[in-house]
Image (cartoon, rainbow, N blue to C red):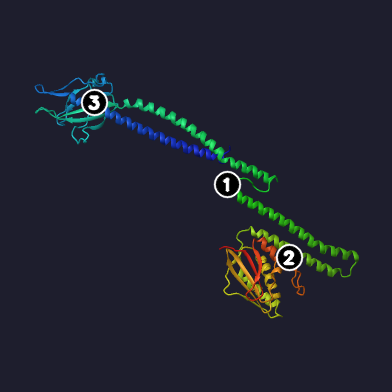
Amino acid sequence: MNTGSLRLRLLLGTLLWMLLALGAAGWGLRQLFEQHITQQFEAQLVLQLDQLSGAIDWEEPSKEVVVAPMVGDSRFEQPLSGLYWQVDLADDAHDGVLARSRSLWDQTLPLPPASGPYPARGYRALRLAGVDGEQLLAVARVVEMPEDDAPPLRLVVAGDTKLLAEPLQRFTRLLLAALAVLALGLAAAVVVQLQLALRPLKRLRADLAAVRGGRAQTLDGRYPQELQPLVAEFNHVLTENAEMVQRARTQAGNLAHAVHTPLAVLDNAAASGDPELPRLVREQVASARRHVDTHLARARAAAAVRATGLATPVLPVVQALLRTMRRLHQERRLSFELAAPAQNLAFRGEPQDLYELLGNLIDNGGKWARTRVVVDVQRQGGQLQLTVDDDGPGIAAEERMRMFQRGVQLDERRSGAGLGLDIVQELTETYGGSVRVQTSSLGGARLVLRLPEALA
């Protein structure tokens, strides 16, 4: 796995997050356990404070504190054992230790002033520095003796916090071992899950290799729903590319066939010494140029379909064509009109192609119209819809599909080669649009052209 590997990045990211989560959980559990054993230790000290409270007595003649033998922890009798008790006066004005445990030996606990509020639980928790500088946890209580002249006494029981270290260390070791085992298990689960999750990508790579090697036409099989949109889009691209290649082959064949005829005519004329050779050269060169221009326009349209940023305003093109058609058909005095209000929209394609498409449709309407041709521009269903209506005789339903076939003229008496509408249909299909024939409200034919709109 290299640094750019998706598998490695997912693995490292997951493991890092897992380690951070386990570290935070371990720290939190250790804090909770430390708090728990500290509370238990404090509860033990309070219990021993209660025993000390019941064991003390005030000797009236000698005015001394007497502590009866306590049944409890033997560490109170061991010097510097870490567990201590002490009794002194609760009056801050008189300092003096009245009694202490044997474990203090000749030391005393450094206590703060006895004055101050005591909680309702009956004792105060203190943090003290021990006789050897160790940290002590202590509980203190002020008691009133029943004797009339007995002063209030402060009783303190303290324990070295090192007594908490051993169980805390033992718990920490067990916790680290448990977290290590959990981390290893989770890491193994992450590795297995990544293998299973990335397996479809491995299969996708194999299928792509099959498509590239020509063993498959599309990506087949079922993929996870996260990959299915990608597979569908790729299959769509493959289909479009296959159609583009087939269209290019067809156009190349058509161009070769179209140019072959003028070349054959020229060859025959040159071989026979025809005196009309210059005229034939001009005619056949013009014919070949028209064919080449037509196929170049189709190739340009195919490229424009996949281009971005193309936007050709429609109304200027329509208005220019209407002016041209008025001059072209001026002998018949036809009226070429723009429906009002026509929307000012834009075509997602080349201006030359829009001139080619609309020019053929409007010219066709002019050939059949009696008095007028009306052009309308609207938006329908997210596409441009351009309609050309004429008031001619109309087109029979059975002839409407045939009129778009190459070389077909519905009326042989009219001029033309029957190529205009065929070019319109091929260019329209190249742009992903459609062209169809309907009955016009003017009484003649309505040609409806739908093309992609250029969005603002």
Residue 233 position within the rendered picture, expressed as x and y whole percent measured from the top left: 61, 51
Q: Is residue 313 visible from the viewing direction of this image?
A: no
Type of amino acid under label 1: Leu
Residue depicted at 83% across the width and 67% down the height: 281
405 left or right, relative to 188: right
- Which quadrant of the rendered structure holds the N terminus? top right
Residue depicted at 24% across the width and 24% down the height: 84
Q: Which residue is mark 2?
A: 405
Q: CA distance from mark 2 to mark 1?
A: 43 Å
Type of amino acid under label 3: Gln
Residue depicted at 17% across the width and 24% down the height: 56
Helix, strand or loop under label 3:
helix
Q: CA distance from mark 3 to mark 1?
A: 69 Å
Q: How many marks?
A: 3
- Check whether the beta carbons of the residues at disc 3 and disc 1 lie within 8 A of each other: no
Residue depicted at 49% across the width and 37% down the height: 15
Residue 171 position within the rendered picture, expressed as x and y whole percent measured from the top left: 38, 28
Q: Nearer the viewer, residue 275 or 260?
A: 260
Which label is found at residue 227?
Answer: 1
- Which quadrant of the rendered structure holds the C terminus? bottom right
